[in-house]
Image (cartoon, rainbow, N blue to C red):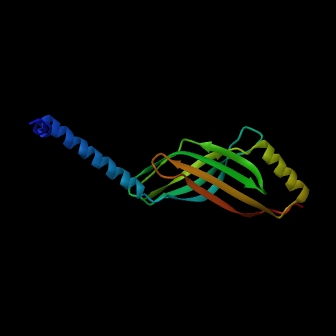
Amino acid sequence: MHIIHLFKKTPLQVRFVWLLSWLLTLGLTGCTTLDKLEPPSVSLVGIKPLSSTGVLPAFDIQLKVSNPNDIAIPLRSARYELFLNNSKVVTGSADDLPTLPAHGEAIVAISAVPEAEGAMALVGQFLIQQPQTMKYQFRAELDPAITLPTLHFERSGQIKLPRLN
């Protein structure tokens, strides 16, 4: 008789168990959906100069981020570094980033100012050696505000410089 009493449920208990199982199913389905997300792709669009009041110039680094998924992805933060001829000239972070629309793309603009030490070393190197090309390496990490891994982006190459006469 005691065992039978354990299996008798009141209508309130039945509703609670049903609601709890429904919420668990919904939560697990949501986690499964997030696990199936494809990582967005990142490409460097350009670098635009900004008006600057200081000695060093300010500029925007523009990245195009494409979202192949059917849900919007908010971006939480970004970290970045720019090296010229192996000298770190820019490093920083940003946190005022857009949400990537579902099956769409957004331009992420990151304002940057060169580091004085790296910029001075680069100018000294440029004046002494007068190179015809300059190596660059740009690295960025974008942190989505949902359970996706951090997006890593790296580009490197050479910039042809004008000749000094």
Numbered disc total: 0
Residue at the front extreme, as displayed:
1
Residue 56 lies in what quarter of the image?
A: top right
Residue 9 lies in what quarter of the image?
A: top left
Q: Which residue is drawn at 58% across and 49% down?
A: 109
Residue 102 visible to an observer of this rendering:
no
Q: Where is residue 62 in the image (x, y as percent from the top left)?
A: 60, 53
Q: Position of residue 65 (x, y in %)?
A: 52, 56
Q: Quadrant location of the C terminus?
A: bottom right
Residue 136 lies in what quarter of the image?
A: bottom right
Q: Where is residue 164 in the image (x, y as percent from the top left)?
A: 87, 60
User: 71 or 163: which is nearer to us?
Assistant: 71
Residue 163 visible to an observer of this rendering:
yes
User: 60 or 41: which is nearer to us?
Assistant: 41
Residue at the left extreme, as displayed:
1
User: 165 or 107: which is nearer to us?
Assistant: 107
Q: Residue at x 29, y 46 (%)?
A: 24
Q: Residue at x 63, y 51 (%)?
A: 61
118, above or below 65, in the image: above
Q: Quadrant location of the N terminus?
A: top left
Q: Position of residue 26 (x, y in %)?
A: 29, 48
- Is 92 displayed left or right of 33 in the figure? right
